[in-house]
Image: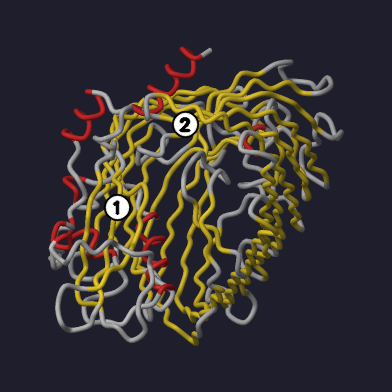
C-alpha cells in the first residue's frame, strides 16, 4: 500500500521596481532584539520592512536529504522586491494588527508562497518607530504536469509544464497537451503582474483544440485589501467548442457553440469601519452565443441563440473576522477562513431588450466556529434573467458544510447542496451524477429542475508525510442525491441515488499545485441501469 501511495505522490508532484528590504541579519546588531508577535505600538510609524525568504525544505531538519538540498539549490527564490510589492503597507505609514494579519493572508493566497508570518521589533534608531519582519516559505513552482484519471466512466490525460513563479518574479505560465472524452488539443496561459499598476495582473490564454479555439484577455486590479479604494477589470474572451450533454449514462445531445464574452467594470469603497467594508461596483457585461448542429444532429428544443448587453450596478459587503485553521479543505496547511458575513448583489438592465430585460445576481456566505473543533459554513444565492433573449430564467442555490474534529486522527465532514430552477437549461442542465458529487455514477446521470445532494465522510489524518513531498489522508464516504422535475428526456430512473466508498488523499503543501489527488473506490447502493457495480476513480480536486 505504501508503495502505491508513494508512486501516486511522485506522479502528483510531477503532475516594476520596489525597494528591496534589508536582510534579517540587520536586526542582530540591535542588541540581539528578538522578533515579537505581530503587535504594533499605537501611532508608531513603520521605519523598516525586513524580508526573509525561507527555502522549500528546511536545510537544518534531520529529515532533509541530498535530494531536498538539491531541490532548494535548483529553485529560484521569490524576489524580495516581489514580496515587498504584495504588502498592503509602506514605510512611514502607521499600521495595526489587522493590517498585519491581512498582509499574511494576501501572501498566503499566492501559489508560489506556502506560508507567511509577520512579526515586529523595535527599529534600531532613535526615532521610536517599528520594524516589520516578513518571513515567507516558497513552494516548488516549476512542475512538469502529467495527469491522467478516470471519473464517471471517462478517461482523461494531459502532459506539459507549469511555472507559477518564473525566475522568482511571480509570473505564471503553463503549456500542456490534454485529451479527454470531449476534446484534444493544446492549452497555453500567461499571467503576470502589471508593472505600471501595483497589485494588478494581466492574463492571456490561447487554446487550440480539435473542436475549436479559446482566446482570452483579462486585466484585473482587484480590491487587493479591505481598504482598497479602486477596482478595475477589462475582460474579453472568445470560445468555440463542441458541447456534449450527458444523461442516463450516455450522450444525450451534442452541439457546437460560438461564444463571445466581455466585461468592463470599476469599483470603489462606499463605507468602511473597523469590522466591515462596503464596496460599490458598476460596469457592463456582454455575451453573444450562437449554436450549430453536429453532423446534422437536431439541436435541443430549448437551445436558442442569444445576445445580452447589460449595464449594471453592484454592491459588496464583507465583515472582517478571519481565522487561520488547518485540515478543513486541505491537509496540514494553513487555511484562512472568514467567520464574518459576505454579501454580493448585482442588478442590470438589458440593452438588447430595453425596458423588458434585466438581470439579478445575489450571493451570501457565512461561517461559524462554535469552538476550536467545529466549523459550519453556508453559501447561497439567486441568479435571474428576466425578459432577455435567454427567456425567463431563475435559479436558486444553497450549500451547507460542517467540519467536526473528533481527535487529532479523526474528523467528520458533511455537506448538503440544494438547487432549483424554473425550467430546464439546455446548454447547462441541472444534474446529479459523478461530476456533480455522486461518486460511483456516470456524469450527469439524472436531470431535473430541482436537485439535492448530500455527502457524509469520516476523514483520517494519520500524520503520514512521504519524504516531505506529500501528506496522506484517508476517507470513507456515503453519497446520496436526486434530481427531479420536468425535463425533455425522462430519466432512466427517478429513484434516489446512493453510493459508498473508500479513498486516499494526497496533498503537497510544498508544491505550487495546490490541488488534492483523489483515489476513490466507490460502489452504488442498489441496481441502476448503465451504472457499473464498482468504480475506481483517479481525479484531482481543490479540496479533501
Quarter of the picture holding the C terminus: top right
Q: Residue at x 71, y 46 (%)?
A: 415
Q: Is residue 319 above or below residue 220?
A: below
Toward the viewer: 363 or 286?
A: 363
Taking the image as shown, residue 175 lies to the left or right of residue 249, namely left
Q: Position of residue 287 (x, y in %)?
A: 48, 62
Which residue position is annotated with label 1? 136
SS at badge 2? strand
Residue 366 image position (x, y, % from top left)? 64, 64
Figure check: 40 above or below 184: below
SS at circle 1: strand
The answer to whether residue 243 is visible is yes
Q: Position of residue 403 (x, y in %)?
A: 67, 47
Q: Quadrant of residue 536?
A: top right
Closer-to-camera residue (382/245): 382
Query: Which residue position holds label 2?
Result: 471
Amino acid at each position: 500500500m505504501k508503495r502505491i501511495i508513494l508512486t501516486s505522490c511522485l506522479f502528483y508532484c510531477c503532475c516594476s521596481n520596489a525597494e528591496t528590504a534589508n536582510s534579517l541579519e540587520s536586526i542582530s546588531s540591535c542588541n540581539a532584539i528578538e522578533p515579537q508577535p505581530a503587535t504594533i505600538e499605537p501611532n508608531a510609524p513603520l521605519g523598516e520592512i525586513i524580508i526573509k525568504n525561507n527555502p522549500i525544505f528546511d536545510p537544518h531538519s534531520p529529515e532533509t536529504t541530498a535530494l531536498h538540498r538539491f531541490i532548494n539549490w535548483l529553485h529560484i527564490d521569490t524576489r524580495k522586491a516581489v514580496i515587498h510589492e504584495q504588502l498592503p503597507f509602506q514605510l512611514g505609514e502607521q499600521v495595526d494588527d489587522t493590517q498585519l494579519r491581512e498582509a499574511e493572508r494576501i501572501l498566503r493566497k499566492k501559489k508560489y508562497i506556502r506560508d507567511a508570518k509577520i512579526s515586529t521589533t523595535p527599529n534600531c534608531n532613535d526615532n521610536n518607530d517599528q520594524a516589520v519582519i516578513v518571513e515567507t516559505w516558497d513552494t516548488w513552482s516549476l512542475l512538469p504536469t502529467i495527469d491522467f484519471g478516470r471519473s464517471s466512466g471517462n478517461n482523461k490525460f494531459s502532459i506539459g509544464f507549469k511555472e507559477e513563479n518564473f525566475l522568482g518574479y511571480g509570473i505564471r505560465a503553463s503549456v500542456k497537451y490534454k485529451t479527454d472524452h470531449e476534446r484534444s488539443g493544446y492549452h497555453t496561459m500567461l499571467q503576470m503582474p502589471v508593472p505600471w499598476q501595483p497589485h494588478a495582473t494581466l492574463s492571456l490564454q490561447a487554446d487550440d483544440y480539435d473542436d475549436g479555439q479559446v482566446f482570452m484577455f483579462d486585466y484585473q486590479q482587484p480590491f487587493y485589501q479591505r481598504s482598497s479604494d479602486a477596482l478595475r477589470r477589462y475582460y474579453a474572451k472568445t470560445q468555440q467548442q463542441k458541447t456534449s450533454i450527458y444523461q442516463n449514462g450516455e450522450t444525450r445531445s451534442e452541439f457546437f457553440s460560438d461564444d463571445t464574452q466581455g466585461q468592463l467594470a470599476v469599483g470603489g469603497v462606499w463605507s468602511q469601519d473597523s469590522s466591515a467594508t462596503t464596496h460599490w461596483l458598476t460596469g457592463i457585461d456582454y455575451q453573444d452565443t450562437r449554436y450549430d448542429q453536429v453532423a446534422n444532429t437536431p439541436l435541443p428544443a430549448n437551445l436558442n441563440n442569444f445576445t445580452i448587453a447589460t449595464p449594471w450596478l453592484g454592491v459588496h459587503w464583507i465583515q472582517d473576522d478571519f481565522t487561520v485553521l488547518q485540515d478543513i479543505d486541505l491537509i496540514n496547511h494553513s487555511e484562512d477562513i472568514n467567520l464574518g458575513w459576505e454579501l454580493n448583489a448585482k442588478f442590470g438592465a438589458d440593452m438588447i431588450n430595453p425596458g423588458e430585460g434585466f438581470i439579478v445576481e445575489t450571493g451570501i456566505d457565512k461561517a461559524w466556529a462554535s469552538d476550536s473543533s467545529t466549523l459550519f459554513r453556508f453559501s447561497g444565492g439567486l441568479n435571474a434573467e428576466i425578459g432577455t433573449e435567454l427567456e425567463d430564467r431563475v435559479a436558486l442555490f444553497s450549500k451547507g458544510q460542517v467540519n467536526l474534529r473528533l481527535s487529532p486522527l479523526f474528523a467528520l465532514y458533511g455537506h448538503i447542496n440544494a438547487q432549483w430552477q424554473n425550467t430546464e437549461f439546455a446548454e447547462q442542465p441541472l444534474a446529479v451524477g459523478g461530476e456533480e458529487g455522486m461518486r460511483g455514477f456516470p456524469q450527469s446521470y439524472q436531470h431535473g429542475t430541482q436537485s439535492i445532494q448530500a455527502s457524509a465522510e469520516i476523514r483520517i489524518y494519520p500524520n503520514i508525510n512521504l519524504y516531505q513531498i506529500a501528506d496522506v489522508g484517508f476517507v470513507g464516504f456515503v453519497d446520496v442525491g436526486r434530481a427531479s422535475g420536468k425535463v425533455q428526456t425522462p430519466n432512466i430512473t427517478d429513484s434516489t441515488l446512493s453510493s459508498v466508498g473508500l479513498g486516499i488523499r494526497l496533498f503537497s503543501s510544498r508544491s505550487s499545485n495546490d490541488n488534492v489527488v483523489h483515489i476513490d473506490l466507490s460502489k452504488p447502493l442498489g441496481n441502476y441501469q448503465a451504472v457499473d457495480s464498482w468504480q475506481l476513480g483517479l481525479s484531482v480536486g481543490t479540496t479533501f
